Amino acid sequence: MVHRRRGGHPGAHHRRRRGDAAELRGGGFPAAVRVLGLVDGERHAPHARGHGPSKWRVVALRPATTALTLLVLHGKQQDFPINIEVDVSFLHESCKGATRWRRVEAGRGLTCAVETDVAMDVSDSKGHKEILLKKDIQEEPYGENGCRLYGTAQVQKVAGDLSFAHEGSLTVFSFFDFLNFNSSHVVNHLRFGPQIPDMETPLIDVSKILKRNLATYKYFVNIVPSRYVYLNGRSVQTFQYSVTEHETSSRGPNGQVSFPGVIFSYEFSPIAVEYIESKPSVLHFLTSTSAIVGGVFAVARMIDGAIYSVSKKID
């Protein structure tokens, strides 16, 4: 019996037969699962259209003592603030020029504070910055020439751009320093929630070396809301994501120049995924054990038959 799934998703196939090995790429799914059944929340094949949020359950086997059930939710999702945890290091020496040490008074003596030309900002697709609710971004020198920005930002659950760009205006910094700003960087990590088992977070320890200055490196992030329910009933709400990327020049076709930097352009998928851990039944354990033992004996018998045939020919 063939089940069809409503709604599209770039990371998953739309047609599966019972028992097929389904490889679901990106979108927060495990690398490979075997689809045992696909039913909606009412435990029948999803075929009706236009009846609000839908729910399908994909039963997946894991190479462990627990089975994993995926609930694929399609429809309106709950809106709540999202905590983005980000850690990005800029590598080029022009960032060292930006990582200037300024003297500030502190009691009787003098101390130093890091001041960088790189700043983090968040805005929606129209450039509105009201989606940024709160941020706590720290700055520190990175190696000999670079600077590191890390921390968290709380944003509204809407599509937006998380930008790390040259923040200095041309009235403060020389035009030469601006033109020589290089966006080579390391994404130490980018997360949109707590970790869960087998979590898809491709932007961890990703290094990009840009050969030209005055360039913008952009990541397109597709976020999938995910919920993981453990055996003890405890659940964790988080977000997994897939990503594509490309480099563009900050010089426009008409001679205009935009601020160089690194941009994470993210959007939320209408598909949500729920993982539910469960213990396999005794019958399933006995069936699996019998299949393994039977396979061992079958292979041994084939090897024995091959050895016997070869020995007969030699004799």
Image (cartoon, rainbow, N blue to C red):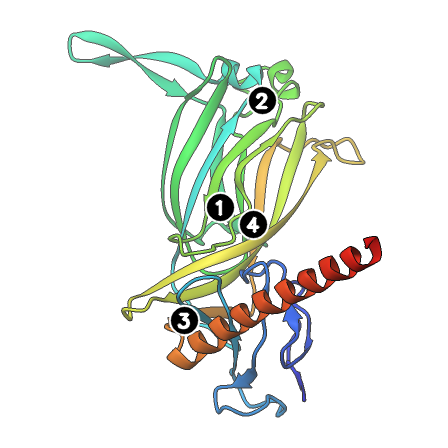
Q: Which residue is mark 1?
A: 122
* Residue 186, percent from left and from top: 54, 31
Instruction: Give the CA distance from mark 3 to mark 4.
Output: 38 Å
Q: Can you tell which of label 2 and label 4 is closer to the viewer? A: 4
Q: Earlier in the sequence, mark 2 or mark 1?
A: 1
Q: Which mark is residue 170?
A: 2
Q: CA distance from mark 2 to mark 1?
A: 22 Å
Who is closer to the viewer here, 117 or 77? 77
**Tally of numbered discs:** 4
60 in relation to 26, above or below? below
The mark that comes first in sequence, 1 or 4, is: 1
| Residue type of the residue flagged with mark 2 | Leu
Say which residue label 4 marks. Answer: 127
Task: Measure the C-alpha gap from mark 3 to mark 2.
Answer: 54 Å
| Image side of residue 50 versus residue 55, left or right | right
Callout 3: helix, strand or loop? Answer: strand
- Residue 285 percent location from the top left of the image: 43, 74
Q: Quadrant of residue 246?
A: top right
Q: Earlier in the sequence, mark 1 or mark 3?
A: 1
